[in-house]
Amino acid sequence: MANLRLNALEQLQGRSNGVAVKAPSEKISDYFGCNSFGIDQMKSTLSPDVFKKVTYAIEHGKKVDVETADAVAAAVKNWALPKGITHYTHWFQPLTGATAEKHDTFFDGLSGIEKFKGSALVQQEPDASSFPHGGIRSTFEARGYTAWDPSSPIFILEDTLCIPTIFVSYTGEALDYKAPLLKAIEAVDRAATYVCKYFDRNVSKVNASLGCEQEYFVVDKALYAARPDLVMGGRTVFGHNPARGQQLDDHYFGSIPPRIYTFMKDFEVEALKLGIPVSTRHNEVAPSQFEVAPLFEDLNKATDHNQLLMDIMNRVAEKHELKVLFHEKPFAGLNGNGKHNNWSLITNTGVNLFAPSSSARDNLQFLTFFVNTIKAVYDHADLLRASIASAGNDHRLGANEAPPAIVSVFIGSQLSAVLDELEKNGNVKVEKGDNMYMKLGIDKIPEIILDNTDRNRTSPFAFTGNKFEFRAVGSDANVANPMTALNVIVADQLNAFAKEVDKLIEKGTEKRLAIVNVLRKYIKDSKKIRFEGDGYSEDWVKEAEKRGLSNVKNTPRALDAFLTKKSEEAFLKYNVLSKKELEARHEIMLENYIMKIQIESRVMGDLALNHIIPTAIAYQNKLIHNANGLKGLGIDNKSIVKSIQKISEHIDAVREGVLAMIEERKRINKVENTREKAIAYCDDIKEKYFEKIRYSVDKLELFVDDEDWPLVKYRELLFLR
Ligand code: ADP
Ligand code: MG
């Protein structure tokens, strides 16, 4: 048993300091996007007429006709074949959380040549039954189909051409993350465009943008393989804290270790080839923790690119004999992994609606979008919380050094002052000749220097200069889920705002005054969600409770918010998700939660009974032998006897804990209602046993001879590479 760990450590001795990596060229622009067939490639390979039709379809979210599809397919084939590409696949994002592919060859046996028709580009029928459907399949047909999303570039992964698609059931229900996201993007575009017209009639489209900062850990592959808990569940269920954790904060500022550095360079090259604009890399707070961030892109593209980037990192890590851990909390006691979602709205005239400016008129527009977003977050805090709920993120939210499960908005002291001022200004009378903006007190919003925006890192939803940053998103998550929720609620809020403003205007109120009056009301209404202090502190938990803000600590309960009347209405109004689809999703997320906890619980049981206890007993026997030997010499060593007793106690605690947990699982597995079952897994398995069992196992780790201990230790996982 112990050999597994020692073998792994031995393998590590033989590792070099990194596989040499050579970029295809010194200049990134020479190879950026060479493996992706995006707008530029379309423009240069399609006839102007076809290109126009495709861009129209992209901009308006419409389908392309058969001839256009054939023309695009031919161009794609001509682009891909010379690169040695033999297969193609529809690439989609089922609700498993991973991405899915089913490869077909271009080679047509009948004609003996490579073929790729428009119909194969546009639609395919993978068997839907093997993907999560949350009950949709049993009521409807098992078949599902994938449909091309022309707004996300086609790309090459290894020797396969991948076509981004949505995945829906035969009766039209969404079975993936992308389909609702595209609808949410459309909803926010419409609503924001309407509101923009109060300020600038030239705006005809608003794009939601996203830049994801992705955190991750990297460990050696051999050490990883020797930790069944990492292999099965992505996190360590046992492991005593190393003597040195992240107290020194030295890793954050330190240089990137050479082996990791070459790995980073390698996956960055692959990402850049795919047109993913990765731009920053650095160490994170915990040892062996890092971050990568691309420049922001259109939300849909950025979402695909984040999924793809994670996939590439996994593939490239293999080559470097490393393993990437995307789990939200791979190591207890250390920082977890998050995925900061930097989000903004940008008009087709190039204006970032979240960028404050020195012009008073533009500032009213900025304040409009700014305040409406805060109001949306206030009204739908529970839905946002639900959209980031997962078994993994439960370990992170509310744990040390992570945003709490309480949703709040941080905006910084300068903007707080602006909103307070606006709120205070009461019902000003504006007369002819008055400087309206001055009277309203918004003539000169202090120009906010980007680097000067407060760096409060403890807020789950923070305004950072010219964008909002949803920081509570889990590192392993598909961001489409939280982004769908966010864009739907902001769309809904903007529409409600426009309605109120229009009503006032109809009644004869001057437009700007109408806008300010409604905003002022929103500022008052949503004030409770604003919090500028330390989000990690106990005080905030108490304060939030006083304010009546929710603090839902676990996934099965947080997910309830998907099914409230309020959420249902918002999703339905924009045709993003129907009640049936929401219910199906809710079911799938609960099932996913149950499976995750079940797997962790089983791994814990296996490790404890088959590895930890036998090792502890063997060591205890050594001590007993020693104690008896000493006794024979007439030496009465109390400390050995005490150790033997302690080991006994911990062995008992582990054994009893595991056996009781197994009994409890048997009981819970019979529970039929999925929500009740998930709650039981949370309360009666995870909460009741995990910490308790772990405590004794981690104590045993301290007792047992290092040579005998079967599991790779934290200090080895975190510091050896
Ligand atoms: P931080 O200081 O939090 O690390 P950065 O300024 O490095 O933030 O930006 C982090 C991410 O935010 C990057 O992906 C960046 O492209 C993205 N970002 C910057 N501006 C915007 C914006 N207007 N909309 C969306 N994302 C943005
Ligand atoms: Mg950030």
Image: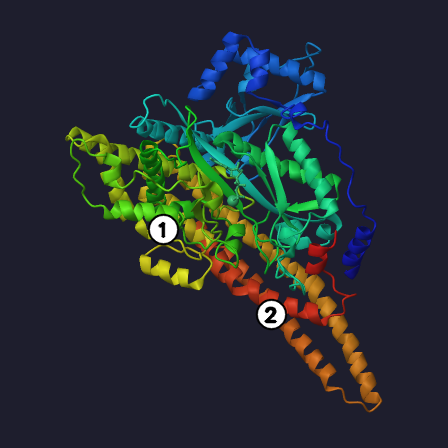
The percent coordinates of residue 526 (x first, y second) are: 30, 48
Q: Which residue is mark 2?
A: 656
The percent coordinates of residue 565 (x first, y second) are: 31, 43
The percent coordinates of residue 1 (x first, y second) are: 77, 60
Determine if residue 171 is in view. yes
Foreground pick, 419 / 9 = 419
Mark 2, other Cα within 10 Å: few <14 / some 14–19 / many ≥20: few
Query: Can you say whether 386 is above or below 715 in the image?
Result: above
The percent coordinates of residue 206 (x first, y second) are: 40, 27
Mark 1, other Cα within 10 Å: few <14 / some 14–19 / many ≥20: many
Q: How is the image coloured?
A: rainbow
Residue 270's quadrant in the figure? top right
Residue at 74% x, 45% y: name it: 259
Left or right: 6, with 555 as reference point: right
Left or right: 468, with 192 as reference point: right
Query: Can you say whether 611 is above or below 374 in the image?
Result: below
Residue at 65% x, 54% y: name it: 251
Mark 2 against mark 1, which lies toward the viewer?
Answer: 1
Query: Can you say whether 30 is above or below 612 in the image?
Result: above
Instruction: Point out the tag, 2 or 1, that comes first from the N-terminus.
Output: 1
Q: Amino acid at mark 1?
A: Arg
Q: Which residue is mark 1?
A: 530
Foreground pick, 685 / 448 = 448
